[in-house]
Image (spheres, rainbow, N blue to C red):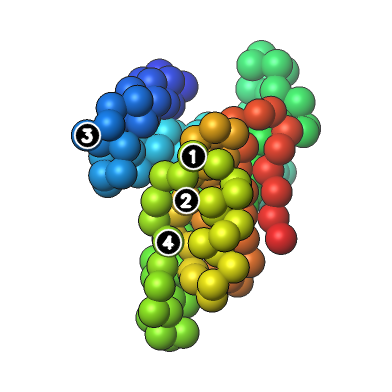
């Protein structure tokens, strides 16, 4: 179910990006968040917290059956936490009295680098040409999730 949901929402996300009337709307974020939420559920099955007993057996069996190695980005807790703990980031922004919060689709990193150099918090940014999603982690550090396998970056 979550594999199908992830696939459908990723397609809808790409379609929204390609539509000039939707590219800068919350429809893009709706589909991207839904895709990441499905991926987070898959991650829970493949990488449970405290994998012992039956959880460990399930984890091993599913990883083997689905051919998921230990380096797979679907296992990242940072990506999973970004969706599941959005409320904590809102709390951070309110407590820091963030005056500017980025939520935008940008063509490339050069524009992002220019915008982020001015004390802005990052709700969600998408670098379209690289297909990189940028957000904040709970501690305010930056999280980048790439569609390129094996590239989840935090700094």
Query: Any mark on residue 102, and which?
Result: 4
Q: Quadrant of residue 29?
A: top left
Contact? badges 1 and 2 (CB < 8 Å): no
Q: Locate residue 31, reporting x and y percent.
A: 34, 35
Viewer-nearest of discs 1 and 2: 1
The image quadrant that residue 28 belongs to is top left
Disc 1 and disc 2: Cα gap in Å? 10 Å
Answer whether labels 4 and 2 touch (C-beta < 8 Å).
yes
Q: Give the mark, 2 or 3, whose residue is nearer the N terminus.
A: 3
In the drawing, does residue 137 fall left or right of residue 52? left
Disc 3 or 4, which lies upstream in sequence? 3
Asked if the residues shown at circle 1 and circle 3 are in contact, with their CB atoms under 8 angstroms apart, the answer is no
Give the spatial CA distance, label 1 vs label 4.
14 Å
Q: Is residue 102 above or below residue 131?
A: below
Q: Earlier in the sequence, mark 1 or mark 4?
A: 4
Is disc 1 in contact with disc 4, using a CB cutoff of under 8 Å? no
Check residue 125 in the rendering and tell me which mark sits there, or answer none: 2
Q: What is the distance, in whole Å, between disc 4 and disc 2 at their CAs?
A: 7 Å
């Amino acid at each position: 179910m979550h594999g199908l949901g992830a696939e459908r929402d990723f397609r809808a996300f790409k379609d929204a990006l390609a539509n000039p009337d939707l590219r800068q709307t919350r429809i893009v974020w709706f589909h991207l968040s839904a895709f990441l939420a499905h991926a987070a559920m898959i991650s829970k099955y493949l990488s449970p917290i405290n994998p012992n007993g039956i959880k460990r057996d399930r984890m091993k069996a599913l990883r083997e059956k689905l051919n998921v190695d230990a380096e797979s980005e679907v296992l990242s807790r940072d990506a999973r936490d970004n969706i599941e703990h959005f409320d904590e980031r809102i709390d951070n922004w309110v407590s820091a009295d963030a005056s500017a919060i980025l939520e935008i689709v940008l063509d490339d990193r050069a524009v992002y680098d220019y915008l982020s150099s001015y004390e802005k918090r990052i709700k969600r940014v998408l670098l379209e040409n690289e297909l990189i999603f940028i957000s904040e982690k709970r501690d305010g550090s930056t999280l980048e999730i790439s569609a390129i396998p094996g590239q989840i970056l935090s700094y």
